[in-house]
Image (spheres, rainbow, N blue to C red):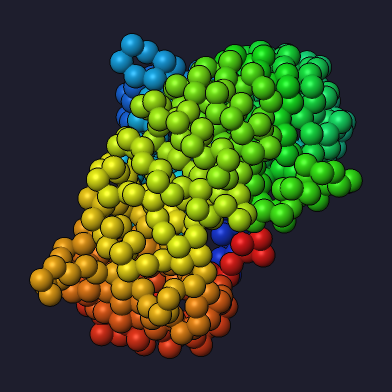
Amino acid sequence: MKCGGLPKVIVSIAALLATQTVTLMDTVRSLNSKFMHTLETNPEHDSLRGLFDWMYSYFRTCPDEIKPCIFYLSIFPRGHGIRRRRLVRRWIAEGYSRDSDEESAVDKGENFFSKLLDLSIIQQMPQLVTTAFSDTRIVMCQVNGFIREYIVSRRMEENLVFELGPNCVLTTERKGRHLIILKNWVRDIIVFESIDFSRLRSLTVFGKWESFFISKSMRLLRVLDLEDSSGLKDEDLIEMVKRLRRLKFLSLRGCREIFHLPSSLGDLRQLQTLDVRHTSIVRLPKSIVKLEKLQYIRAGTTVSALTPPAPSSSLLKFHRCRGLLGVQVPKGIGKLTALHTLGVVNVSASGGKAIGEELKKLTQLRKLGVSGINKHNSQDFFSAISGHVHLESLLVRLAEGNQGSLDGISLPWENLQSLKLHGLKDKLPLLEGQLSKLKKLDVEMDSLEKTDIESLAMLPNLCILRLRVKQLPDSRLHFYAEMCREQLDTFKKVKILDIGCRSSNLQVSFGSKSMKNLELLEIDYSSGSCQLAGLNNLSELKEVLLKGTNDEQFRIEFERHLATHPNSPAVKLKKLPAST
């Protein structure tokens, strides 16, 4: 992993280890602990000189604006999956990506991400075989192992990043701009209080949270990232808000023991990013409307994550829903006109027509997610967002028992690139002709008709298609369309197909002119058997992912089924999480 897949490095290290006999493991341990130093100073690795010369030259001559973004990557542990949006939002909060006359800070951050991807400094996660969108749209990435070792070996020279890990000792020399607390650090309060936090700009915690992690000397802190930390409580948030008034980025994502945001949240007047997705928060405080610089709000969770200490009528309403749930937002949310990402909002719990009027004011929205759409509020909601010309991504989850709420809905959605429709009954709203730019479609519905498949087939730029259907009329799902008994070229750009159906003995077939660019096929086998026909027609298929089963013998049998495929696509198992 430390070699980053670079052949020169692998060959050089293999050549060194091949000469070792008795001292092999000692050599391995020494190399592992001082990896980059050994490669740069040991004469036995002279074959890497050209590689290091290139890296020295690159880091010396690369644009100044991208250098901080590169060194910043060492914040994340080796092999750690990094969400693209998490990284870009942090860059913005740090001031590495700023608005200009030519482009927004978000677009500039996405361009930085794309450049690092092009240079192989960051890479797509190895378990994924396709990007389908463009490279800048991948969801998860990781830092190239070799590049990370190089960055880590120099980050203290820049006095930028320091970490608390298993080998930390008491010292007066620990100071810098970015502090990382690793999972395997012993949480020693004496060591922690010996650190100089006067220059600290970001704090990132992996693993268990301790209340002493917030210091009164962290006056300049801009980024507090506690994603997936454990042990965080509501009372800790009160202390955070009190001491960290300059915060621009606050992530509590995955902190399931958090139930409420404090009313004092409104004191964080510099806050740009608030991520409370997959916590147990079901409503945002009224004071949030004071945060006029907020650009990004992510909230909502799955039912299994909601374990409130005491039931209430509003919480019980959430429990009757399924899937991703929205949060209640306060009156006045329309004042946050800088918002470009908002979701998931429970429209029903937030006042129906009243929240529609608030959403109408948020004209800069690029990404919006809502739940609780029903027959009483659907027309008002869609009318409210009809003028949102910047909207690129939309998630709509219908309230239970309101599957017909999208009947007759037709909007100018021509700028949408991503659309999620969850909770439909037996027909899709009119899509063909309105969604010429749509790249991703995610549909969950009770039943799917042949005519719906034919309408999806004609979406010209669709790259990712995810279908979840409870039942099919004849247990058949055919991905092709005909005219005058001739098959048409359909699903021309689809590269990822993810299908799941509760029908037993599901039959899926692919036409000879359908999905010619499909690279990844994901199938949910958790609800029954599935027969596939026409797989050899999928000439670009690289991988089949079987979800919901952990039967290795089943995987082997399926692999045999693909034995005649010209690409010999890989077949992998992926067990579904309990919450799905």
| Residue 157: image location, x then y, percent | 55, 25
In the foreground, 415 or 257: 415
Query: Which residue appears at 73% of the width and 19% of the height?
Result: 287
Q: Do we see residue 154 in this rendering?
A: no
Q: How many circles with numbers are drawn on the protein?
A: 0
Query: Which residue appears at 21% of the width and 62% of the height?
Result: 490
| Residue 110: image location, x then y, percent | 39, 32
In the foreground, 268 or 192: 268
Q: Is residue 425 left or right of residue 401?
A: left
| Residue 282: image location, x then y, percent | 73, 39
Query: Which residue appears at 31% of the width and 73% of the height?
Result: 478
Q: Do we see residue 467 in this rendering?
A: yes
Query: Which residue appears at 74% of the width and 39% of the height?
Result: 281
| Residue 327: image location, x then y, percent | 67, 38
Q: Is residue 43 left or right of residue 154?
A: left
In the foreground, 24 or 485: 485
- For the C terminus, the image quarter is bottom right
Q: Is residue 287 above or below residue 523?
A: above
Q: Quadrant of residue 74?
A: top right
Q: Is residue 313 above or below residue 445?
A: above
